[in-house]
Amino acid sequence: MNSMVPILVLIGVGFVLDRKFKLDLYTLSKLNFYILLPTFIFRAMYEAKLNSGTLEIVFCALCVLILNSILSDVVGKMQGYDVAKIATLKNCVMFNNVGNMGVALAIFVFTNIPYVIDGATPYANLGLVSVVSIMIIQTISSNTYGFYQAGAGRLTPRDALKVVFHMPMVYAIPLALLCHLLPFDLHGLFFFAPLNIFANAFVGVAMIALGVQI
């Protein structure tokens, strides 16, 4: 009730609004991809307490990705699929929707009972960092290897790198990590207030866009 129902409500709002007003999904997607998602990731990484546990999460996410690739490749060959069909199967198995659904789910799960202790939410930050770490691995790999795979090898490594460096998220991550090293807190600076507003808007707009897609 406290985790899935709020997500379904947000998706339902997008669905109803689109039925009534025919919202522009292209505009919503660009808003999310170029503004809301990068600011959300920047804030999450900047405010995160990074430690060896974060590296373990990244390592596990990579292991799951590789094992899913191997598993789908074996199953595809056992079924006698051609190269294109195996590539499609691998993309379906390897990549998930953690960027939209995963972030929203982590927020609602770890800010509700039983993860509320004495009015505080001590697991919210860890849950969010975990999901964001997985989302980074998923987004970069799906927009490089995933595109290459979908084109059955027609996308060159150079084209794949171009795709990566066109993603604002790629710049948001190192920038946030570099800001960790600064001798002062960014929260007091003028740009952090609008950045905070954009970051807070990410989940709502992403879920509404998902409703529009439906």
Image (spheres, rainbow, N blue to C red):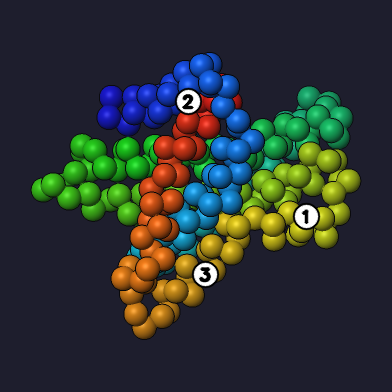
* Residue at image point 60% right, 30% down: 24
Looking at numbered disc 2 in the image, what kind of residue is underneath it?
Answer: Gly
Kindly identify which residue carries mark 1. 160
- In the foreground, 113 or 174: 174
Where on the picture, by quarter, is residue 5? top left
User: Quick one: quadrant of the C terminus?
Assistant: top right
How far is disc 2 from disc 1 in space, using C-alphas?
32 Å
Q: Is residue 120 above or below residue 203?
A: below
| Residue 193: percent from left, percent from top | 36, 60
User: Quick one: quadrant of the N terminus?
Assistant: top left
* Residue at image point 82% right, 55% down: 159
Considering the numbered disc 1 on the image, is that residue within a helix, a strand or a loop?
A: helix
Kindly identify which residue carries mark 3. 175
Check residue 14 in the rendering and tell me which mark sits there, or answer none: 2
* Residue at image point 41% right, 80% down: 182
| 46 left or right of 135 in image | left
| 145 left or right of 2 in image | right
How far is disc 2 from disc 3 in space, using C-alphas?
32 Å
Looking at numbered disc 3 in the image, what kind of residue is underneath it?
Answer: Leu
Verify CB contact (< 8 Å) between mark 1 and mark 3.
Answer: no
| Residue 30: percent from left, percent from top | 61, 44
User: Which badge, 2 or 3, comes first in the chain's sequence?
Assistant: 2
